[in-house]
Structure formats: C-alpha cells, structure tokens
Image (tube, helix red, strand yellow):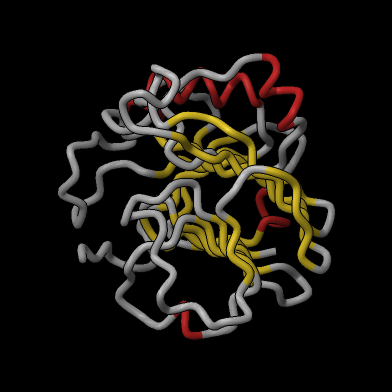
C-alpha cells in the first residue's frame, strides 16, 4: 500500500490491488484526479476539502455519517465537530475510518475538539492516523499531540498546517512535533506502508506535498 500527501488534508491511498482512495480533495495543479479514483471521502463542505468536479461519474463519494462498503473497502463516517463548542462556530465534521486489505486508516478531517472514550471505542486500533495540527480552524499542535497519543496509531501523519503556498491563518507543524516522540522525516511526498509500519508508534513527517495548493 502506498500513501501520498497531495497537500493540505488531501491524501492518495493506493492499495496493493490497485484501488485508489482520495481524502478531502481540493483544487490541484495536476491531473491526479483524471485517473480512475475508486473512493473519495469528504469531511465537511469547505472549498479546501470538497472539490469533486474532476472525478469521473463512477467514483464513489462519501460525505455522510454511517458505515458503507465499496467492493473490499469499508468506510465509516463518525460525527464530530469543526470546533470545541459542538459545531456552533464552524459546524460539523466527519471523522472517517477506512478499512482495506487489513489496514485501518483514520482521517480526522478538520477536527476541532478533544476525543472522549466513546470515540476511542468507535475508532478502535489504528495503523495510520491523519491529524490536523495547524490550529485556528482545527486542533492546534499541542492539542493534536494529546489526541494523537490518545488514539495511539502505529503511524501518525500531521496535516492541515502552514506550508509556503497556503495563506490561511494557521500555524506550521513545529508545535505538534515538539510534543511528539519518535518523529521520522521522509524526504518525499509518498511512502510504502510496509516499509515504515511496525509495532512501535511513530510520527511520519512528509517533507513536501505532491502538489501546490490552488485557491479557487
């Protein structure tokens, strides 16, 4: 299985059987969406997370709560909030649990609050966690570190933080990293899961996104 950071909160997951899964797509410079994408998950309807115009008609798009299946992929959308006041400031957010080929992947979307034991029970054991760390609109670095340790995924990948081509009022990844142990830098936008996964929990920092962020 190959995981690529396309930028912001958008990742491309390629399974060993050739399925392609995209999380929180945004307007990209490039033709990655021109190829056949099997599944797309959308955590909330903000422009930097819900760009779907380029996908083909047979791409399955998930943007709701509940458990769904698409061939050998199981998708579970878990209700959460974009802020720490029950959605009263920025609305709802969907946490996605993706289960494919025996791997459990969790994308937290624009999560803005801490998680309770109930969430831990619903999410369960994780192999890969994508977590927002930039603050302002989501968890900040320190808050994200607590959520990351709470979920205790084998691999944790920070997302939704300041990069040179993003002009949002969010912070960089540094605050998250200083509160985390066992950080491994990968000088690429992609990696093969079998090359990095083990029983030891670690944070993977992908050094640059595959695409630059494009504002509409």
Residue at point 15%, 49% (across, down): 167
Q: Quadrant of the C terminus?
A: bottom left
Q: Nearer the viewer, residue 126 or 86?
A: 86
Q: Residue furthest front?
A: 88
Total marks in image: 0
Q: Is residue 89 above or below residue 197?
A: above
Q: Nearer the viewer, residue 133 or 72?
A: 72
Q: Quadrant of residue 134?
A: top left
The image position of residue 42, as x and y in percent, is: 50, 54
Q: Quadrant of residue 153?
A: top right
Residue 70, visible in the rendered structure: yes
Residue at point 39%, 17% (across, down): 85
The image position of residue 108, as x and y in percent, is: 53, 38
Q: Is residue 14 above or below residue 77?
A: below
Residue at point 63%, 36% (across, down): 78
Residue 46 in the figure: left or right of residue 33: left
Q: Is residue 36 above or below residue 156?
A: below
Residue 184, visible in the rendered structure: no
Residue 176 in the figure: left or right of residue 22: left
Residue 208 in the figure: left or right of residue 115: left
């Amino acid at each position: 299985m190959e995981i690529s950071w396309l930028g912001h909160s958008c990742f491309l997951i390629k399974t060993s059987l050739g399925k392609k899964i995209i999380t929180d797509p945004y307007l990209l410079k490039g033709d990655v969406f021109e190829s056949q994408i099997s599944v797309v998950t959308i955590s909330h309807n903000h422009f930097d997370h819900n760009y779907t115009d380029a996908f083909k008609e047979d791409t399955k798009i998930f943007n709701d709560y509940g458990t769904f299946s698409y061939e050998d992929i199981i998708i579970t959308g878990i209700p959460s909030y974009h802020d720490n006041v029950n959605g009263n400031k920025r609305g709802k957010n969907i946490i996605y649990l993706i289960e494919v080929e025996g791997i459990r992947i969790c994308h937290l979307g624009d999560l803005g609050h801490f998680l309770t034991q109930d969430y831990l029970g619903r999410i369960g054991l994780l192999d890969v966690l994508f977590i927002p760390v930039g603050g302002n609109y989501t968890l900040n670095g320190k808050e994200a570190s607590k959520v990351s340790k709470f979920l205790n995924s084998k691999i944790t990948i920070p997302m939704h933080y300041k990069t040179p081509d993003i002009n949002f009022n969010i912070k960089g990844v540094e605050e998250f990293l200083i509160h985390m142990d066992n950080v491994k830098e990968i000088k690429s936008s992609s990696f093969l899961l079998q090359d990095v996964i083990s029983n030891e929990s670690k944070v993977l920092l992908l050094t640059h996104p595959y695409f630059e962020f494009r504002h509409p």
